[in-house]
Image (tube, rainbow, N blue to C red):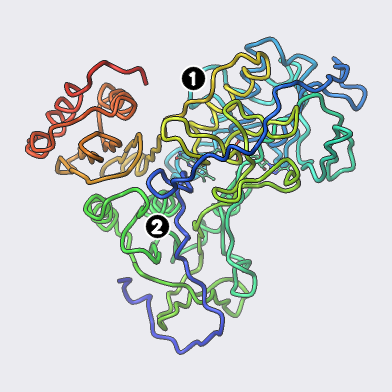
Amino acid sequence: MPSGSVRRSIATMANSLSLKHGLSLWCPQPASLNRIPQPSSIAFSSSPRTYVVASSTFANQNREFVIVGGGNSAGYAARTFVEHGMANGRLCIVSKEAFAPYERPALTKGYLFPLDKKPARLPGFHTCVGSGGERQTPEWYKEKGIEMLYEDPVTGLDIEKQTLTTSSGKLLKYGSLIIATGCTAVRFPDKIGGNLPGVHYIRDVADTDSLISSLEKAQKVVIVGGGYIGMEVAAAASGWKLDTTVIFPENHLMQRLFTPSLAQRYEDLYQQNEVKFLKGARIKNLEAGSDGRVAAINLEDGFTIEADVVIVGIGAKPTVSPFEAVGLNSNVGGIQVDGQFRTKVPGIFAIGDVAAFPLKIYDRIARFEHVDHARRSAQHCVRALQSAQTSLYDYLPYFYSRVFEYEGSRRKVWWQFYGDNVGETIEIGNFNPKIATFWLDSGKLKGVLLESGSPEEFELLPKLARNRPLVDKQKLQSASSVEEALEIARSSMQVETAA
Ligand SMILES: Cc1cc2nc3c(=O)[nH]c(=O)nc-3n(C[C@H](O)[C@H](O)[C@H](O)COP(=O)(O)OP(=O)(O)OC[C@H]3O[C@@H](n4cnc5c(N)ncnc54)[C@H](O)[C@@H]3O)c2cc1C
């Protein structure tokens, strides 16, 4: 429970808001929760559309390749276009943001380091920091002959005429179109105070800059949501030495992935860092103070938590507007594509967070809000554009987080998960610093999470998750260390599998 900052309130508001579905998790439909058969009715076209004439100077309205969205997947797609000699004078990226694509995960990590601990700033994390390679600054795009249209979101699509319109009134004709519009943060409705000054949602650099200027004046920070955003922002706020409380409706942190006992380890660590938790909390409304800024959060059970900054991390939804006409998936949301990222409309593709694609390894349709998928889907899509022979996308679910990494923190936290979190779990290790959770389904190892592993141990995880070996449960349970448990799992693999 939070300390004295929580007081009883008799506030009554007719419309209460449940956070039941409000976890912020990069996999919005995690493996174990989302067994959806792949529809066979959707027809994907393999025939390329007639190309418009490419203009090396972009002097006219014709573009051969257009990417809508200037985020992670657009950045990696641009890099793949360059690698295949398909960019110079042929590629245009239309972005809503004012910046060239950057590694978005940094926003709740290095970007939020305390101001005296060398926080990350652009151009330090433009795309390709994450996977090595040249840093893709605005100059990089110029040098590669890629046209960048900044702060000009696409507002309309005409499939017949193969044209896009932008908010500034540009009309762009495309040969092939890649939709890479990512996700939009879920917001609390205005009527319950979701738009008050001091209430923040984090999706881009502008959002995070605004949060930082609020944190500079803050004393009491309340974070709503026990998912990735919640965990990462709470770790950052504790580094700023602010009075920090995390509230969420579930029983423990990261409910969609962590087991209760694993979550407890992390919650203890956060508490050692002075972060308070209020679990099982349901928000009624956010209340303004006399200055019009957020001053408190009222809960359904009558509690009120004082706050001068509120960060809301209750999930994200795919940004499908204005592309609904190319076919949406009603189960996982997003734009439906095939294993080569083709929508049902010839010449139109979708990648990254917004794409609902066949997850081959588990034979279902899925959508992932994850930077690794953004990168891989971009690369795969551009290869498919170049050659109709490209194999089908075969993604292995992978999630990670890193927190408390600023200089002087008591301990850093870095975990990775690969596979499917189905079946029974076996936990090995004491969190000092390592711990591992193994998911066994009908005796087969389906998923594995590791905290504070060595590079070699982390490299083993995707091999295990792909191989899905039959593991001797008793033997695994009796392992006396994470190292021994990983060795038992490794030696159970029939054939070593590539990641
Ligand atoms: C704060 C934060 C932290 C994260 N941390 C992690 C992490 O630790 N690990 C991890 O794996 N993943 C993390 N993610 C998720 C990861 O960043 C995304 O999965 C990844 O960015 C998806 O790439 P994308 O290109 O599909 O979408 P985005 O990177 O979101 O890019 C979409 C772009 O499209 C633009 N756009 C939207 N609509 C239009 C339009 N109509 N016209 C033009 N442009 C438009 C948006 O402004 C944005 O620039 C994090 C995300 C956030 C927000």
Mark linked to residue 479: none
Say few, some or many: other residues with alpha carbon within 10 Å of mark 2 (under 14 / 14 to 19 / 20 or more). Answer: many
Q: Residue 307 placed where, x, y %? A: 47, 70
- Quadrant in which residue 443 is drawn: top left
Q: To which residue does mark 1 refer?
A: 132
Q: Residue at x 8, y 38 (%)?
A: 474
- Quadrant in which residue 400 is drawn: top left
Mark linked to residue 226: 2
Q: Residue at x 37, y 77 (%)?
A: 6
Depth-wise, is mark 2 or mark 1 nearer the camera? 2
Left or right of residue 201, residue 149 in this image = right
Q: Residue 85 placed where, x, y %? A: 69, 10
Asked whether 189 or 305 is in front, the reply is 189
Query: Is the residue marked 1 within 8 Å of ligand 1, measured from its CB?
Result: no
Mark 2: amino acid? Gly
Asked whether 457 or 413 is in front, the reply is 457
Task: State which quarter of the image contains the C terminus.
Answer: top left
299 up-or-down from 207: above or below:
below
The kind of secondary structure element at disc 2 is: loop
Q: Residue 412 placed where, x, y %? A: 30, 40
